[in-house]
Image (spheres, helix red, strand yellow):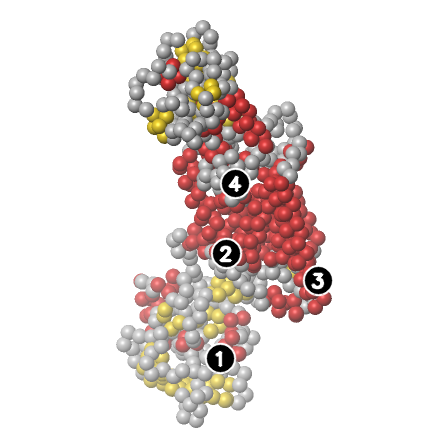
């Protein structure tokens, strides 16, 4: 055994001790056969003991770390360094736990000296697996360098291979210790803590929030749903496919954050302004005695549908922009009801009570022949003339062509004989008495729009308020008001007779039926939609989201025209279709793709079955899913498995766009050109398990 290197080490003991100089030799195999001490002052063992007693009185902060060490037998020896067994693993350098270390290099090889282990570079805490199989957490620390020290040149491969076992700074140097043993150095070191284990306050809340908004690249074919269903890649994937997966762009979910903020804001405003309807699954009835147009109190019952989503009633949702076919096109049933009311009003007249308590516009059957006088032209002597002939329709309470100044009935703009075409008089003559019974009486009833189908009644204000209707103080006839304008709200129709609010198809995507409905949408969007937007980007995912929702609402408007529906149900099922398309596009790189397909299919079938419950629109779910399926083939990013596969998928994009346009165009024709009536189609959205399970409700009032 030949000696290779000789090094002179000078140790300066703490607390003003003397200098002790040692000369040690290193051999080729790493053993230290001898140690020569020179110098005066107290020995290293005494200094070691002195420092140990000071440490027991007050421990420095770095000794409070959880550093496992060994309880080995402590040998009492005067020398500082002793030889150790060959079979134990160690670092070939001296670990000197002192305050000041001066290492002098021999003049032969000035760059060959090794840095003591206490001068190693700082490192973070790490968990090292020991040879016994136990995992130990090891906190490494960095020692503050003293001016004038010599830096060592440990090669990088040797330094990186050291943390294979647990090494501890002892008074002899670095050696292996057992996992369950704890020992602390006896001499105080000037050290800085690099990392300290333990959670900060609020970390339990901050970590999940950071995870939610962290910017992680979304793996193609896996994603959040893939992690939940234990989906994984195959072991062998072609390098060409791997390169495509790695080159895919990573996007931020801006559209998800924007649409979620809009949903929350609109829901809060709608609930604050319109309030909350009765909560439940059935119909809510309100009965009260109300003064009507006959001058007597009558028992009236008002029926409205309860809202189990904890939100506004249906009339308020229609006002906000819900999907409602009579507001989007000229509905034949609503149009027939309005025309029937006009025909009945054309043959009406003013009923004046004999006790001078008031008058109201009614039919002859509703006017008492003993208690009132029915002023009907041309039988009544108060009939006016039109072009030299007696008028045949009328009279109208508080309105006459002879007393109205604006708009005046003068040639060539005389009012027609048909009273349903008379305008609203905005200014009357100032005379107190006209000797006309239908003008001098006190009117007790005016037009009131009740319900959601444009039904109008001449009634009192008290009754109109009880029925949650729209009372028109300025008009005298129902033909002078447009109830569908009042029911629908938003922008007025260009033609008052023809509803044209087609923008409800996408406006209803931003509305919700209540607080619970909004929470369900927000949960879906912050998980599924956000995950897919990281893959596709905000532009692609917004196109799929909005077009799927519009198609679903259009189908719902065809098959369920008189039900007010809100919410992005069609859009959400279109996003679910994206998961299927992504699975099909990545079928060749996934392990057990059939298993992933069956899991996803079970989830979607359960959601479709949930749509068979009453008051849930399954037509929007089905058609939104189908349209989203074709749109996903066209807009979602994909990977190709060769040149022929790339051409096939390009043709697939064109075919998918053509199919979507065909479906959408067919729905537009069925909605506007050839309205479809399908009685059995309602079985797709509600199965009548009992007699009243799928009871059709009418929001119009019921009188008893």
**Tag 1 secondary structure:** loop
Query: Residue visible at 53% across and 21% down?
Result: 344
- Marks 3/4: CA–CA distance: 42 Å
Q: Are marks 1 and 2 in contact (CB under 8 Å)?
A: no
On-image quarter of the N terminus: bottom right
The residue furthest front is 388
- Marks 3/1: CA–CA distance: 64 Å
Query: Residue visible at 40% across and 52% down?
Result: 202
In terms of depth relative to the viewer, which is nearer, 569 or 413? Answer: 413
Closer to the observer: label 2 or label 3? Answer: 3
Q: Which mark is residue 92?
A: 1
The residue furthest left is 16
Q: Which mark is residue 517?
A: none
The residue furthest bottom is 108
First in sequence, mark 3 or 4: give its number.
4
- Residue labelled with disc 4: 500
Measured as percent of width and height from the top left, residue 50 is found at 32, 70
- Marks 1/4: CA–CA distance: 88 Å
Query: Residue visible at 29% across and 77% down?
Result: 17
Question: Taking 617 as reference, is 199 left or right?
Answer: left
First in sequence, mark 2 or 3: give its number.
2
The residue furthest right is 644
- Marks 1/2: CA–CA distance: 54 Å
First in sequence, mark 1 or 4: give its number.
1
- Marks 2/4: CA–CA distance: 35 Å
**Tag 3 secondary structure:** helix
Q: Do the residues labelled 2 and 4 touch (CB within 8 Å)?
A: no
- Marks 2/3: CA–CA distance: 30 Å
- Residue labelled with disc 2: 253
- Residue labelled with disc 3: 648
Q: Residues within 10 Å of mark 1 (few under 14, many from 20)?
A: some
């Amino acid at each position: 055994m030949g000696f290779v290197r000789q090094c002179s080490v000078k140790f300066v003991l703490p607390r003003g001790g003397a200098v002790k100089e040692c000369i040690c030799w290193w051999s080729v195999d790493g053993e230290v056969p001898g140690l020569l001490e020179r110098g005066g002052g107290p020995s290293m063992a005494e200094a070691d003991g002195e420092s140990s007693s000071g440490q027991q009185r007050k421990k420095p902060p770095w000794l409070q770390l959880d550093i496992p060490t060994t309880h080995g037998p402590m040998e009492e020896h005067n020398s500082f360094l002793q030889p150790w067994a060959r079979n134990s693993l160690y670092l070939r350098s001296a670990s000197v736990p002192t305050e000041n270390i001066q290492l002098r290099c021999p003049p032969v090889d000035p760059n060959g000296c090794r840095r003591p282990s206490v001068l190693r570079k700082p490192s973070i805490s790490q968990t090292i697996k020991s040879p016994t199989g136990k995992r130990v957490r090891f906190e490494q620390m960095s020692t503050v360098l003293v001016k004038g020290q010599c830096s060592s040149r440990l090669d990088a491969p040797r330094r990186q291979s050291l943390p294979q076992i647990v090494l501890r700074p002892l008074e002899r140097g670095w050696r292996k210790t057992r996992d369950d043993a704890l020992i602390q150095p006896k001499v105080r070191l000037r050290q800085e803590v690099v990392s300290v284990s333990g959670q900060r306050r609020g970390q339990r809340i901050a970590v999940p929030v950071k995870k939610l908004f962290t910017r992680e690249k979304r793996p193609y074919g896996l994603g959040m749903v893939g992690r939940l269903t234990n989906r994984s890649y195959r072991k062998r994937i072609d390098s060409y496919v791997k390169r495509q997966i790695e080159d895919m762009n990573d996007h931020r979910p801006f559209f998800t954050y924007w649409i979620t903020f809009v949903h929350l804001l609109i829901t809060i405003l709608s609930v604050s302004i319109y309030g909350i309807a009765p909560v439940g699954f059935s119909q809510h009835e309100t009965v009260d005695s109300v003064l009507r147009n006959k001058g007597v109190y009558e028992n009236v019952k008002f029926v409205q549908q309860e809202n189990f989503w904890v939100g506004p009633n249906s009339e308020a949702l229609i006002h906000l922009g819900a999907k409602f076919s009579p507001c989007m096109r000229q509905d034949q049933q609503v149009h027939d009801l309005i025309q029937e009311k006009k025909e009945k009003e054309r043959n009406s007249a003013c009923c004046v009570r004999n006790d001078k308590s008031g008058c109201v516009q009614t039919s002859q059957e509703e006017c008492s022949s003993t208690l009132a006088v029915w002023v009907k032209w041309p039988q009544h002597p108060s009939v006016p003339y039109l072009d030299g002939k007696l008028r045949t329709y009328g009279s109208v309470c508080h309105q006459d062509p002879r007393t109205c100044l604006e708009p005046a009935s003068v040639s060539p703009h005389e009012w027609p004989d048909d009273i349903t075409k008379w305008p609203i008089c905005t200014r009357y003559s100032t005379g107190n008495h006209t000797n006309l019974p239908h003008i001098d009486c006190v009117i007790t009833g005016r037009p009131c729009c009740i319900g959601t189908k444009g039904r109008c009644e001449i009634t009192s204000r008290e009754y109109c308020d009880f029925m949650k209707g729209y009372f028109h103080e300025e008009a005298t006839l129902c033909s002078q008001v447009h109830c569908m304008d009042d029911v629908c709200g938003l922008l007025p129709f260009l033609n008052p007779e023809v509803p044209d609010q087609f923008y409800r198809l996408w406006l209803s995507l931003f509305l919700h039926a209540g607080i619970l409905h909004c929470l369900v949408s927000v949960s879906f969007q912050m998980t599924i939609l956000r995950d897919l937007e990281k893959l596709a980007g905000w532009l692609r995912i917004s196109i799929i989201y909005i077009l799927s929702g519009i198609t679903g609402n259009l189908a719902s408007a065809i098959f369920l025209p008189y039900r007010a529906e809100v919410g992005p149900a069609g859009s959400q099922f279109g996003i679910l279709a994206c998961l299927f398309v992504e699975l099909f596009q990545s079928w060749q790189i996934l392990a057990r793709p059939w298993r992933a397909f069956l899991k996803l299919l079970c989830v979607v079938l359960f959601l479709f079955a949930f749509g068979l419950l009453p008051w849930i629109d399954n037509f929007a779910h089905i058609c939104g899913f189908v349209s989203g399926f074709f749109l996903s083939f066209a807009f979602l990013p994909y990977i190709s498995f060769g040149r022929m596969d790339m051409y096939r998928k390009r043709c697939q994009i064109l075919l998918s766009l053509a199919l979507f346009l065909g479906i959408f165009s067919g729905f537009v024709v069925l909605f506007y050109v050839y309205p479809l009536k399908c009685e059995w189609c309602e079985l797709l959205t509600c199965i009548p398990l009992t007699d009243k399970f799928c009871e059709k409700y009418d929001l119009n009032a019921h009188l008893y």
